[in-house]
Amino acid sequence: MSDERRPALIVGCGYVGRRLARALKSTHNIIGVVRSESSREELGQLGIASALLDLDQTRAKKFLPREFTEQAALFYFAPPPPQGLSDVRLDRFFPMVDALPRLFVYISTTGVYGNTDGAEVDETCKVNPQTQRAQRRVSAEDMTRVWCTENQVRRVVLRAPGIYGPGRLPIERLQRGEPLIHAAEAGISNRIHVDDLVSACIAAEQNTEARGVYNVTDGNSISATEFALRVAAIAQLPVPPQISMDEARLTFTIERMSFLDESRVVSNRRMLTELGAQPKYSDVDAGIRASLADARE
């Protein structure tokens, strides 16, 4: 690999990873790691080199060639498995790394803070996961800290809230007329446009002083109801009915309610002042419009 193009490995090269790959394509030699042949074909259409790896399979020995990871920026986006309290996929991945990367970036979730009844949280707050989904993320964060410390690899954890962008707006729910939680009862939630999350990943690599945990949000803490209403207005869709939380429990899935039951304001001050990432879409309406326009292209 030439000195001019830096190596980058994106493990779990899906929605976020593909956009990161496109952003880095001109400056990096990129390899996207995916689990299916169809995903590999999608990367091929983008001109991105790829490799297949199913982390649900039994532990393998030294799967990754040295050139994949040696002095690379390693972006790990593969989600934990859907069950259990630990991230066994990440636990299987680390022994496959033969040559050490120069950087390990992990996308986690602000769900690790749990419900604060609308109080603000920042990176100094203790984690308080209240779902198995969040517990798996805490497990993964712990694994990255141990592995990166033992191997002296710079580590950046990006705690992301709900990710929206092209193809990731509640358009179908609005078209179906699915009800929303009454605005007065809806908890406070946080989000980030996918392109701003990509920018945070790039900042994590470029800012060599960046280490540790950063909350990455657009700085707007509004309810899921308010966000959906803004999408409906901008997309010119009918405004859905609103129901109480008690009514929602009778019809919404347990997983969906687990998100709606939590309310917190997530501070992004450290992202702005220390990571050096500035969200392009700090205005939610602008992010929604850009997402709709991009989806139509």
Image (spheres, rainbow, N blue to C red):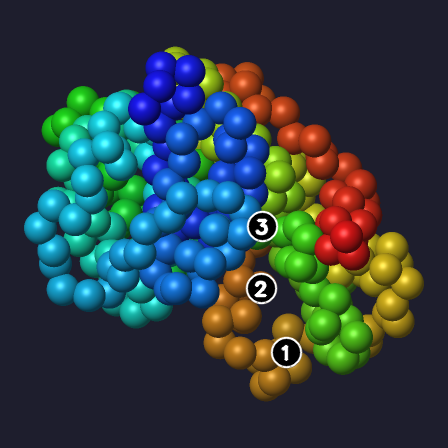
Q: Which mark is residue 240?
A: none
Q: Is label 1 in a helix, a strand or a loop?
A: helix
The crowding category of the residue bearing disc 2, from other C-alpha atoms within 10 Å (few below 14, some 14 to 19, many at least 20), is many
> Is 208 in front, or is 267?
208
> Is 277 in front, or is 109?
277
The crowding category of the residue bearing disc 1, from other C-alpha atoms within 10 Å (few below 14, some 14 to 19, many at least 20), is some
In the rendering, at what x and y percent does residue 223 appear? 69, 54
Tag 2 residue? 260
Q: Is label 3 in a helix, a strand or a loop?
A: strand
In the rendering, at what x and y percent does residue 269 appear? 56, 25
Image: 144 above or below 235: above
Q: Are marks 1 and 2 in contact (CB under 8 Å)?
A: yes
Left or right side of 168 for 24: left
Q: Which mark is residue 163?
A: 3
Q: Residue furthest left?
A: 61
Of the residues under marks 2 and 3, which one precedes in the sequence?
3
Q: Examine the image and state in which quarter residue 174 appears.
A: bottom right
Q: Residue furthest bottom?
A: 250
Of the residues under marks 3 and 1, which one precedes in the sequence?
3
Residue at 86% across / 60% down in the picture? Answer: 235
Q: Is label 2 in a helix, a strand or a loop?
A: helix
- Three-letter amino acid code at disc 2? Leu
Image: 100 above or below 11: above
Tell me the CA gap for discs 3 and 1: 23 Å
Left or right side of 232 for 92: left
- Three-letter amino acid code at disc 1? Ala
Residue at 78% across / 56% down in the picture? Answer: 296
Q: Which mark is residue 248?
A: 1
